[in-house]
Image: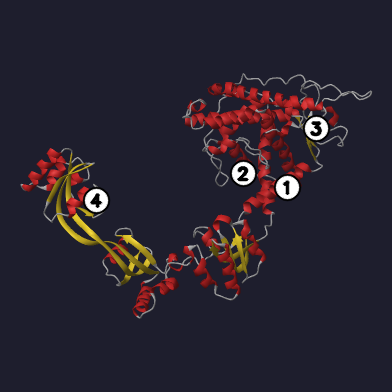
Amino acid sequence: MFFHRIQTRLRTPIVLLLLFSMMLPVFAQDDSYTIPDPPEDIDLDLVIAEVGDTEITLGEFRQRVRLERLRTYVFLNDLISTQGDAILDLNNPQNPVGGNVQALLGFLGDDAVLGEQTYEPLVLDYIYHQEAAARGIEVTECQINQAWTNRLNLPPMGDCEVPEGFEDARTAYIDLAETYAGVSAEEMEQIVRYDAEFSAVREELVSEVELEEEPVVRTRHIRIQDEADANTAIERLADGEAFETVLADYTLDVSALGNGGDLGEFEEGMMVQPFSDAAFGAEVGELVGPVETQFGFHIIEVTDQITAEVADVRQIILGTEEEAEAAVRLLNDGRDMQELAATYSIDRVSASGDLVTVQAGQTAAGIILEEAVFSAEPGDIVGPVQTERGFYVVAVEDVYEDVIRIAARHILVETEEEAQTVLERLEAGEDFAALATELSIDPSAAGLGADTMTLATGGQAEGFYGLSELLPDFDVVFDAEVGDIVGPIDTGELGYFIFEVQEFSTRAPQNAEIQRNQVVVEWQEEQLASDSVVRTNLWLSAVPFDPMPSDVFEILAPLDEPLMAAHETYLEQREANLIPNVLRGLQLPSGDAAQPPLPPSGASDAPPGVEVNPPADSSDDFPPDADDAPPGVEDPSDEG
């Protein structure tokens, strides 16, 4: 569902309000509008809920429903003022908010959903109001203005200073509320005070939450694909072999062991410039450094050089063979290659006439051109050579062997002094890979050490992890002791894991805010279920379907028809759901007692198909006895 029912008090019943940026309200009003009289079978004084000694009537509920409709129309009108009335064309696939507006109308057209998301917050208003009184909380003018600012969808306040346009927007909103929802100025101010009290009480509830530290563990592990190998590894560890030795023999996680500073092969320009220049300027086996880059100071050793034949050339690409042959004649007569390329080449790149270095095996125009270029001598004109791109004419300036890739390793340290020390130790004969593993601040040198958290997060985090933070199967390590070997644990495709437990600790909960919110949710549920709160479904047949969008803002008239369609769909679904409920409730007469006939809609205090909650063992006066509802009928508030 687009509007899922939330368990916390619903301060913003229209979820879409959060999807758009803040905007300054623009209100208009029709003073001639009159709120329709209620149907004859609706008693506005009917009590539909009790919170302590406070009674909530059907009349107050209907006011709130209209107020929620009004808030939606105000929002849509404000949206048009910033995005244009094209957002009202719900059939236009290019409308970026068309689906969301349609969902809003579905929400407003469903009496059960709109009513429920108005009824529970209304009950919670009084629960929070009474809790504020019990705690001695007096909301300040600043808190009330903040609540108004939120309701008006204005920019946030700063240092209790209301935003520009605050007073005009509040006055206009109060007028709208009275005209279209029947909410007086005094009642509107009280509703906003309830908003402020809600926030104040919630802050106190959250501040009282004492969250316990949660246990965490640090482990290292060996991941093995084969079960037999995993069992062998366990036996070797049990016999006292070093974890590092067994890890090196079996681990599937290559990043666990480190590369001893080995960078593999790379081409010129792939590394930062100072590093690349130093490495490609060195001979195999030569130690170079210290070389400073933005990462620190490097000691570099080139371990291999990969050479290939390369050629420095200039080229022209032409459209026809005749043109290419003419270009060859002109070049042989001494014409300038760059001048001809700029004038005649059909290729932008070659039109510059710049010198290009091409490598044997990687010439862009294919094997034919490669054979022609690399069989030529410096100074030769090659061509025309036909390719898919056109006819090439190439001036070969030089052909030679060159280093195209190197393999190297490095040790990275933070200071030049440290780098000099490393260089001295290497020159004294110490092992390069061992020093890199020990000293390099490049994490790939020493590897991730099989740290479970590091490997599980792709190197983004290391150290301790909590229960079920990784795979739930790993939680068994929390039952072990420091130094224990745990496993092998079969994780299926990931293989078998063997853990060494290194350390236990505790930390503040990672989901502290969620836990605090949960405390508030639980408190609300306790209040709603307490003996001091009585709720019913008596509101369900009395959700008003006014005002319409065009009643409030003429520009919203295109939404009247889709809103009516959404409401008719709801009525059809309700009727379809009521029919099987009625059939289940039918019973044959038994003795002198016959099943009472099903009352027509609105004929009793309880609407058809609605159970009254709580059951009949409540007080005699309120709510009505459960027998007032037809037998065998389910509560439609459970629908969808």
Q: CA distance from mark 1 to mark 3?
A: 24 Å
Q: Residues within 10 Å of mark 2 (few under 14, many from 20)?
A: some
Q: CA distance from mark 4 to mark 1?
A: 73 Å
Residue type, label 1: Trp
Q: Which sits in the foreground, 471 or 369?
A: 369
Give the label, 4 or 3, closer to the camera: 4
Residue found at x 13% / y 56%: 378
Is label 4 in contact with label 2 (beta carbons under 8 Å)? no
Q: Which residue lies under the disc numbered 1?
A: 523
Q: Residues within 10 Å of mark 3 (few under 14, many from 20)?
A: many
> Of label 4 and label 1, which has the lower sequence position?
4
> Of label 4 and label 2, which has the lower sequence position?
2
Residue 632 lies left or right of residue 368; in this view the side is right
Image disc number at residue 142: 2
Residue type, label 3: Val
> Of label 1 and label 3, which has the lower sequence position?
1
Residue found at x 56% / y 25%: 28
Q: Which residue lies under the disc numbered 3?
A: 612
Q: Picture quarter containing residue 632?
A: top right
Please tell me whether mark 4 sits on a helix, a strand or a loop.
Answer: loop
Q: Residues within 10 Å of mark 1 (few under 14, many from 20)?
A: some
Please tell me whether mark 1 sits on a helix, a strand or a loop.
Answer: helix
Q: CA distance from mark 4 to mark 2?
A: 73 Å
